[in-house]
Image: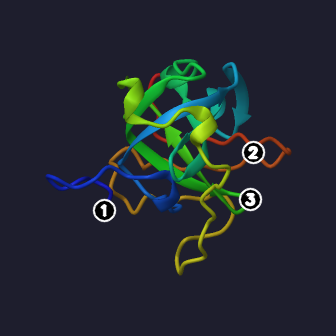
């Protein structure tokens, strides 16, 4: 659903919807937080959070595991193999060990001051679930990845199926 056909344009922030897999998108890192450890039902996880954007808007990005701490403010990057979740009515991007973060030419994305403040809102769709849940539809033999808010007021979550933790 999110893979690009040959000659198709890359995704834009404004087109992101909750529950998407395999998202490839070029963005500018607007701000980044240092890595932190969060406590989840499956144990401790390392994450870092950033705000990224393009000419259509900005979105929160959570980098999981080995991807945590790889982003720097101001960088132009392409995320490959990301997925989206919904938390408190906002679409969020996630990148983990199955995805990649690649630096790209600075001219491929707008400067931070040219990125609008708009963020993609979650649309209520049948079968989308509520809160931060993301359905895996059984496509991953390891049980899929799911994002769940921790419930303790944190905006953290967990990614099931991540290896190396």
Q: Is residue 59 visible?
A: yes
The quarter of the displayed image where residue 154 is located: top right
Which corner quadrant holds the N terminus?
bottom left
According to the image, label 1 marks what residue? 1
Rendered location of residue 70, percent (x, y): 52, 18
When the figure is inspected, residue 114 is found, relative to residue 134, above or below; the finding is above
When the figure is inspected, residue 33 is found, relative to residue 13, above or below; the finding is above
Q: Are marks 2 and 1 in contact (CB under 8 Å)?
A: no
Q: In the structure shown, which secondary structural element does the residue marked by tag 3 occupy?
A: loop
Q: Are marks 2 and 3 in contact (CB under 8 Å)?
A: no
For disc 3, the neighbor class at 10 Å (few under 14, some 14 to 19, many from 20) is: few
Residue found 75% across the figure and 45% down from its top: 150
Q: Residue furthest left?
A: 6
According to the image, label 3 marks what residue? 88
Q: Is residue 97 visible?
A: no
Q: In the structure shown, which secondary structural element does the residue marked by tag 2 occupy?
A: loop
Q: In the structure shown, which secondary structural element does the residue marked by tag 1 occupy?
A: loop
According to the image, label 2 marks what residue? 150
Q: Is residue 162 left or right of residue 116?
A: left
Rendered location of residue 2, percent (x, y): 32, 57
For the residues labelled 2 and 1, the Cα–Cα distance comes to: 29 Å
Give the mark, 3 or 1, whose residue is nearer the N terminus. Answer: 1
Give the mark, 2 or 3, whose residue is nearer the N terminus. Answer: 3
Front tag of 2 and 1:
1
Give the number of callouts.
Answer: 3
The quarter of the displayed image where residue 159 is located: top right
């Amino acid at each position: 659903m999110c893979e690009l056909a040959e000659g198709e344009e890359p995704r834009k922030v404004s087109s992101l919807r909750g529950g998407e897999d395999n998202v490839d998108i070029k963005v500018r890192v607007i701000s980044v937080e240092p890595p932190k450890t969060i406590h989840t039902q499956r144990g401790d996880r390392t994450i870092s959070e950033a705000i990224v954007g393009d000419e259509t808007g900005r979105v929160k990005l959570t980098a999981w595991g080995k991807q945590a701490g790889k982003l720097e403010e101001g960088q132009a990057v392409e995320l490959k193999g990301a997925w989206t979740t919904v938390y408190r009515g906002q679409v969020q991007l996630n990148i983990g060990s199955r995805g990649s973060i690649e630096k790209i030419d600075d001219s491929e994305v707008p400067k931070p001051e040219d990125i609008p403040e708009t963020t993609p809102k979650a649309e209520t769709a049948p079968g989308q679930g509520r809160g931060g849940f993301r359905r895996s539809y059984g496509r991953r033999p390891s049980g899929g990845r799911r994002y769940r808010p921790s419930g303790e007021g944190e905006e953290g979550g967990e990614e099931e199926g991540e290896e190396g933790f």
